[in-house]
Amino acid sequence: MHEVPSGTKCFDWVVPEEWNISEARLTGPRGDTLASLSENNLHVVGYSVPIDERMPFTRVKPHLHSIPAMPDAILLQDVDTLGEQGNVVDVSKGYLRNYLIPRKLAQPATKGAIETVRQRQAAAERAAREAVERAQENVNLLNRTVLTIPQQAGADGRLFGSVTVQDIATAVREARGLKIDKRGVHLPEPIKSVGTYMVVVEVVEGVTATIKTMVVAKK
């Protein structure tokens, strides 16, 4: 960094006298403070000149530069009184600074952080839609599937063992290459006789397919 003394001429400009801000504020007609350097996110543009006078707002307005009001915080975890993780919420600055941030419950809602959250939410929503579409394709496939599970059985058709939810999940994987959690196979009790059964399986949470399952005697 190179310092240039005040008064130095640089092309058609002269380096102004150095000064430091002790206070900057805007007050209304009744003397109430509208914004201040100590309390608000108020910035003074470089190379400004000191001023202390009354003037109408129409004269001040061209020198004011602001951004639209922004929320205060982005939740990093679910907070009962505020919302779910990723929500952008309005909270007091003191609550954010003294409670939420120290507990890693939220972060300041800067413009960049808000944009990052929106991109993540859009990506998550897109992934969820694609997962539902894939699940529906798998449902259609399984609804057309017929499983044949051979088992040792007696002359009366009773199995020497039984067909369990794990057996059906394994048969689905071998027949269609789809991994089904055995906990998603809706079978009230193990199958103990040869026959044809309509077995409901959960492809993803809340999305089910019905598979025709034929248990036959092993020859």
Image (tube, grey):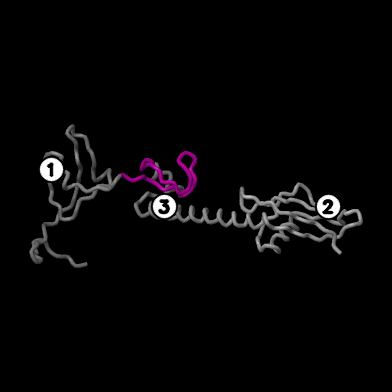
The residue labelled by disc 1 is: 59
The alpha-carbon separation of the residues under discs 2 and 1 comes to 90 Å
Tell me the amino acid under the disc marked 3: Arg
In the image, what residue type sits under mark 1? Arg
Badge 3 or badge 1: first in the primary sequence: 1
Q: Tell me how far mark 3 sits from mark 2, CA to CA.
A: 53 Å
Which class describes the residues within 10 Å of circle 1: few (<14), some (14-19), or many (20+)?
Answer: few
The number of numbered badges drawn on the structure is: 3
- Pick the front one: 88 or 189: 189
The reply, left or right, for residue 71 in relation to residue 84 is left
Q: Is residue 12 left or right of residue 40?
A: left
- Quarter containing the N terminus: bottom left
Q: What x and y, as percent, mark residue 217? A: 85, 59
Q: Nearer the viewer, residue 53 or 67?
A: 67
Rendered image: mark on residue 192? 2
Disc 2 secondary structure class = strand
Span of residues in magenta? 69-94
Q: Nearer the viewer, residue 91 or 127?
A: 127
Residue 161 image position (x, y, % from top left): 85, 56
Q: Which residue is mark 3?
A: 118
